Image (cartoon, rainbow, N blue to C red):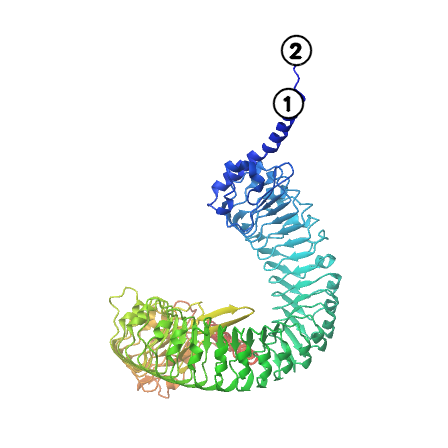
Amino acid sequence: MAHFLKPSHLLLFVFFLSLLQSILPTRPEGEALVKWKNSLAPSSFLDSWSLTNLDNLCNWTGITCNSAGSVSGINLYEKQLDGMLSEFGFTSFPNLNNLTLAYNFFSGPIPPAIENLTQLQYLDLSINSLDGPIPFQVSHLQRLLVLNLSQNALQAPNWSHFSSMPFLRILKLSRNHLVSKFPEFISNSHSLAILDLGQNNFTGDLVREFTNLQNLETLWLYRNSFEGPFPPDIVQLSKLKDLALSSNKFSGSVPNNIRLLCDLEYLYLGNNSFKGPLPPNIFKLSKLKHLVLWSNKFSGSVSNDIGLLHELVTLNLNSNFFEGPLPPNVFKLSKLKFFALHENNFSGFISKDIGLLSELEILYFGSNFFEGPLPPHVFRLSKLRGLDLSHNRNLFEGSIPIGLGLLTNLRYLDLHSNNLGGYIPSDIGNLKLLVLLDLGSNQLTGPLSKIVSNLTNLICLDVSHNSLSGNIQSDLWKYNDHPTLEYINLSGNHFTGELPTTICNVTSLSVLDLSNNELSGALPNSLGNLADGMLYLNLANNQFRGTIPTTFSRSCRLTYLNMDNNEFEGLLPPSLANCKHLKILDIGNNKIGGTFPSWLYALGELEVLVLRSNKLYGTISGRSIEDPFPKLRIVDLSHNQLTGYLPIQYFKNMKSTDNLYRYRNSTGPLSFSYEAAVSLTVKGTEYEVAKNLHIYTAIDLSCNKFQGEIPKVTGELRWLALLNLSHNSLTGPIPSLLKNMKELQSLDLSSNQLTGAIPPQLTALTFLEVFNLSGNHLSGEIPQKGQFSTFNNDSYLGNSALCGSPLTKKCANTASPPQEVGNGDEDDAGDEWTWEAIVMGYGCGLICGLSSAYIVLKLGKPWWFVRYIEVLQLKLMKRYA
């Protein structure tokens, strides 16, 4: 007998089925999400994800459902999640169309199982730490509209396994580790509107890659290694609005048919090798807003047609070879905000029409040939935030106009290296937002205006190399007024008086240079406390006296300390041993006494040690130290009263370095730097070495009371360039092992008591330019080979038993043994000269000499090239002799 449900029961059954249908899909999806959550680092953002909360799945954090209650979207953007994708249930989400996990801490590879998300349209895994090759299964997601994998550590796969993606509109792969040619599948993804491959290492030319991408509106290929000419197919992309090819290896000219890109708004071609004049039609891109061409080889004048770019907001022509006056119509670009011409050859006066650029925020005209007074109309540009008129090679002149104080939005002001004179205007104190003030290398006079003390946001203050005078006022050093002050350079002026104790309050300082002034008095002992944060301290060439502060703590961060040429006395403070990061220590030309401080051996990072012209005495001993001075490259202990044997064995690690002694910091669009300098005696002349300090290797122990023989270990200093042991009491012969010092350029052994012959092996020192053996007891014939033929008689005076050229004293007519170089590198076959050999030798010499002369006249004596030619000439003459 058939049974029928009552209508009320049937209605209840249908309702139950519909309810079950809506709940069932959520259970496996919710369980998969909880399983993945449990594989991640604990996060409060996912507290709602719970098996006890499955009925509320569609309200979980980051979860979106469709009308049927199935998960359609997972958006966990910037939720600080940490973990991997390997436990994500890619097979559990049949209706997922949006997966956004950007801006988290996910790591590991992208699982190939991602291809199971067949309904996916938006995939954003950017700004994580994902690595490994991009799986080709990503391209199986044929419904994708957006694919963003940028800012990870992903590697390039075999792109040939990728399928084209016909609906893809946005593809972003920037800032990964992709090393390959241009991916083939991209060229066949016809719907692409935005393509970003920037900041990878893609290579090759781009001749035919864009033929099919007619829908492209944004093309970013910046910071790669693409090369060749401007990609010709790009000009056919009629919808293109944004083109960024900066920082690649493109070369050649920019095609004139670039005007076909009539919708172009952004054109970034900076940091390539494009050359030639700008194509005339580039000025017909009437919608162009940003034209960025910095660091190329563009040349010629800029056409007055630039005034046609009415929408231009950014014009960056920095670091090219543009020349001539500024085109008048450039001042009609009323929307211009960023105007940069730094490092070109522009010339002439700057028109008063510059005041018409009322929207201007950044103006960089430095390193050109502009002249005349500072254009006063610049100071009408009330929105200016950055102004750089530095390093003009024909020099701005006159005083700084008072109107400067009207630029109350100014944050960066650089007038360095001009010909500006007069006082620092008082209204500069109105620039309350100023972060960088650089007035260095001008002819400014008067006191350091107290108004500078009102600039409470300053990070960098540079007024070096002017004629400023007076005391350094104490209110500049109030930490509460200058909590951000990081860099102060007052060097090369006429400041007088004592250093105020309030300087010790500015604990934010990293660089302080007060050198080359007339400052005097004792240093505040608390100055050592500044070293806890300071990296560079230069007090050289003043009149400071008293003892060096003793308060250097274990937190000392100093890398450079220069107190050269003052009147400091007493002992070097042992607390300096706490400055473990110290690379350069120069306390030369003072009155420091005592024995050589053994605690200096503890400075394992020390590379330059200058204690020249002090009152040090006694022997130098390092027997208890296993490896003293492991990184030392320059040591100057000359003009002291040191005794005992030469301590060469303690300075055995001499080698040049690639490390520049430079402090750099970027503050907004402008940067500032500081280069460490040391006064060295190089080839007999004392001068300040800064830019090339890292290449020098030198030992100067001259003018002491060292005795005994020159140790043979000296010959092991293969990288040493300068060795000065003169004016001591050294005895015995000159070691022939000095021949191994192949880089030696200057050798001074004068004014000792050396005996014996000059080792003929020293003729192997082909880079030797300065050679002085005068004032000894040497005997025998002077070697004539190699560099020895270039030294005059001053090198040998005071050795009564020496003979031969260049001395007038002739040697006895006795057979002398062959003078062998003994290095095994030269192909010497004897000393017999035939007329053929002479002609060939002089022919080679003539060619090399003329080449060297041409380079000298053309380039201004590049030393390295001249030496190279000279060495080559000597080798050729020996070979054919």
Q: How many residues crowd around disc 1 within 10 Å: few (fewer than 14), some, or many (20 or more)?
A: few
Q: Position of residue 120 (x, y in %)?
A: 63, 42
On the question of residue 101 being in view, the answer is yes
Q: Secondary structure at mark 1?
A: helix
Residue type of the residue flagged with mark 1: His
Distance from the alpha carbon under mark 2 to that under mark 1: 19 Å
Q: Depth check: 862 or 833 in front? A: 862
Residue projecting furthest to the top: 1
Nearer the observer, disc 2 or disc 1?
1
Q: Secondary structure at mark 2?
A: loop
The numbered mark at residue 710 is none
Residue type of the residue flagged with mark 2: Met
The answer to whether residue 645 is left or right of residue 654 is left
Q: Within the image, what quadrant is residue 798 found in?
A: bottom left
Q: Within the image, what quadrant is residue 415 found in?
A: bottom right
Q: Depth check: 642 or 389 in front? A: 389
Q: How many residues crowd around disc 2 within 10 Å: few (fewer than 14), some, or many (20 or more)?
A: few
Residue at mark 1: 9
Q: Position of residue 148 (x, y in %)?
A: 60, 50
Q: Position of residue 325 (x, y in %)?
A: 68, 79
The answer to whether residue 161 is left or right of residue 36 is right
Q: Within the image, what quadrant is residue 558 found in?
A: bottom left
Residue at mark 2: 1
